[in-house]
Amino acid sequence: MEIDIPELTINTGITCLVGENGSGKTTLMRLLLNLIKPNSGYITIDGIDNNKSEAWKSITASYLGEDSLIPFLSPSEYINLIEDLFHVKYSELPDAVSGVRQFMDDALLAKAENIGRLSTGEKKRLGIVTALLKQPKYLMLDEPFSNLDISHCAALSEILIKYKERNTLVISSHNLDLVADLSDVFLVLDKGRIVYNCCRHDFSTTNSLKEALKEKISSSRN
């Protein structure tokens, strides 16, 4: 998938990438994280060229999928590893990421089985929590609500609403019902291009926002 975005600035708050499968959402996140390199142009995070310096990594975290987890560790072992790597404590998370322990829940943390044996939803919760454990200024989450039950979706929404107040988040989602009130800016992607860019506050109601996004996504199929 080629990404063709001449210029884009992502500000504090939540920017939500929406579009059909294969529209370029995950590829764009991978470019932002320097997991793949652009053929031309450049990407800066906090003014740092992500291809020329690794300084941006200390203020950035992500969860793009279970491939980033270590399958032979238990959840608690993985949490301990992240604590040691970033000199943070899961038990001492501040108010900025309040709700994380409830989102994870003690039952998941106490599981003795390896991460590779967890359900997809459990892996997702663990991955999101460990990304937040770093307390990053820039956070990227690919389809964070998929495979979560209703209660965990609600808990995650509350966490992200509070966390976005001082930080910059990029998320992707197919579920407009969940992200319409949560996100501040919406980018509709199609074939690696941004075909629609809007703010939640441009619309008088949540329904009108969702209808506009659905229309743009639908028209991109043609």
Image (cartoon, rainbow, N blue to C red):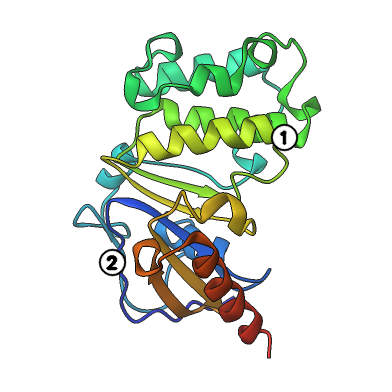
Residue bearing the label numbered 1? 149
Mark earlier in primary sequence (1, 2): 2
Name the residue: 64% across, 56% down. 175
Circle 1: residue type:
Asp
Residue 168, horizontal then vertical, whole percent: 32, 48
The disc label shown at residue 213, or none: none
Name the residue: 55% across, 30% down. 155
Residue 69 visible in this rendered orientation of the protein? no
Q: Is residue 143 above or below residue 27?
A: above
Q: Secondary structure at mark 1?
A: loop
For the residue carrying disc 1, how many other residues have a C-alpha within 10 Å: few (<14), some (14-19), or many (20+)? Answer: few
Q: Is residue 74 above or below residue 135?
A: above
Residue 76 visible in this rendered orientation of the protein? yes
Q: Quadrant of residue 202?
A: bottom left
Residue bearing the label numbered 2? 9
Q: Is residue 124 above or below residue 204?
A: above
Name the residue: 48% across, 56% down. 35
